[in-house]
Image (cartoon, grey):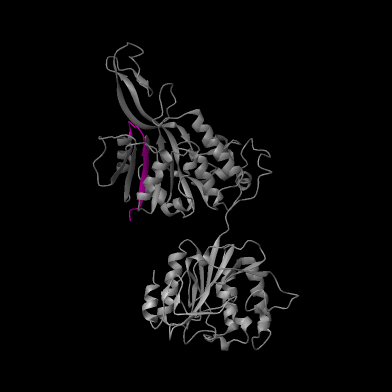
Amino acid sequence: MRDLSVLIPARNEMFLGRTIQEVLKKSSSDTEVIAVLDGYMDKNLPDDPRVLLIHYPKAIGQRAATNQAAKVSKAKYVMKLDAHCGLDKDFDTKLMDRMEHDWTVIPSMYNLHAFDWKCTVCGHAIYQGPKPEGCEKCNGPVEMDVIWKPRRKRYTKYWRFDRDMQFKYWGAYKKRPESKGQIVDVMSSIGACFFMERSRFWELEGLDEKHGSWGQFGTEIACKSWLSGGRHVVNKRTWFAHLFRTRKGFKFPYHLSDKQVRKARAYSNDLWKNNKWPKQKRQLSWLIEKFNPPGWGDVIAKAPPIARPMTKGLVYYTDNSASERILYVVRNRLKAMLKDWEIISVSQYPIDFGTNIVMPIKRGVKSLFAQVLKGLESSTADVVYLAEHDVLYHASHFEPIPNADDVFFYDRNRWCLDTDTGKAVFYESDCPSFMCARRDLLLEHYGKAVTMMNGHKQWTSKYGYSPPRGLPKEVRVGRAKNYMAEVPSIDIRHNNSFTRKRMTKDMFRNDRACKGWKEAYEIPGWGVTKNRWEEFLRECVV
């Protein structure tokens, strides 16, 4: 793993080679360049093992090019840099020395004096811009004279966006006490250069290509950084210098139009003012209140609350009593299916599964309830699925989301499999290990159940084994609903199962207790089970 990948999207850039040389010359750590030649070729680039070129014959746009370069990177950090920039000596080390995971860092910025047009006759220099027809003093021919120095009097450290989400410089910010220091919170940035951990870049979902190719870069990065719960800061210990095409006729390499700019700004306004970004933990109003920029007034006073999808999590509980083979296969399947989920595991001795909580308590129903409650208290998910150590879950079990705050949602597509014979039985039942609900509802039920159980020496059915049933009516919460997952999950009935094996109908108190009874030696979606337990279990590994 390298320390840093500098990501440079480039479109018809005359100074790409010079910018790459700046990175190679001024870096002091294990830094590479990943440059994207977006719709053009450039054969005059440094031949260096630290330089990787990606070529797109047809331009994909600046945002998409940056994202593609980030996908190629394997470095700890990434830095997006425009293809016409100078850099401070040891810029990479200075950025990495003062860094936290949830920071986005902007170096201080100079204007770059990249070149002059110099008369070959009288030596008169014309500041960078489109090539003149001749010297303005003697009308002699001119040629490019590369200067490549920062303009020391054109120095910027503070930026913001206005009530239309449009980028603005903010020189007045330097008068505020919060602007003092080497690392300073800053509302926004220009978008030509930003630095962060690569994993953080993808936590923020990269660059949002729905904006279009260009426009609102700084606003997007700043809002994502702040509103996700992180920081967006300027590091004054280092700088970059950016070439600005301010003179008439000095065109941008990417084709731009007013229509593109309006589209990007309209999308940005809708996304941030209406709090529509799914990763938001803070509202835009929080950011405005923090910086109190001029001109905002009550623009967002009536903004809707943050709109985000419900988050799902897993609370896995185990007394570690099943065979290691069963425990491994069950956890292996859950890891593969729930890669992006929050997983809380509660066990009687340490296990390597999600965030593990150890409760060295005696096996029993009281312990089970205490484990579930501890897992729920440690979870941050909106919706929680409960999972037991000896259930082979199918992915379709985890698809539904409870459609109300007061619903315990049970999957009744459950087959019990006897490991001794391979016999499988189905009957309708509401099992906690096949249940999901809103976390707040689960917390309320299990909190009451544990309190009641701790007041009695022995567990009875009164104490809410299958929510909401069991608790006295005056304290009961929620209601039960059921669904049938597309493919069943398998409750493994082994010699050390927590509850006794009931593989024949005569083991139930009445027909109602085993409603829908089926017997088979083959489970739908899983295959043949008769007298082949070890082989069947191997087939369940994913």
User: Does 50 lie within the magenta span?
Assistant: no
Q: Residue at x 33, y 48 (%)?
A: 31
Say if 101 sits above or below 264 in the image.
below
Which quarter of the picture shows residue 380?
bottom right
Q: Position of residue 43 (x, y in %)?
A: 25, 35
Residue at image coords 36%, 78%: 535
- Point out residue 202 in the picture as x, y percentages from the top left corner: 45, 52
Q: Name the residue nearer the viewer: 194 or 269.
A: 269
Q: Quadrant of the N terminus?
A: bottom left
Residue in view at x 38 percent, y 50 percent? 71
Near-viewer residue (297 or 539): 539
Residue 205 seen in this snapshot? yes
- In the rendered image, the residue lying farthest to the top is 138
User: Residue, x 63% and y 81% (percent of image)?
Assistant: 512
Residue 537 versus residue 293: which sits nearer the camera? Answer: 537
Q: Check the picture and name the quadrant holding the C terminus.
A: bottom left
Does 84 appear above or below 281?
Answer: above
| Horizontal and vertical percent position of residue 143 | 29, 21
| Residue 425 position within the rendered picture, expressed as x and y whole percent measured from the top left | 51, 80
The answer to whether one can see residue 181 in this image is: no
Quadrant for residue 266, please give it: top right
Segment tinted magenta in the rendering = 1-15
Work out whether residue 364 or residue 418 is closer to the camera in this orientation and state it: 418
In the drawing, does residue 319 fall left or right of residue 444?
Answer: left
Q: Is residue 2 magenta?
A: yes
**Number of numbered labels in the structure image:** 0
Residue located farthest toward the left when viewing the structure as drawn = 47
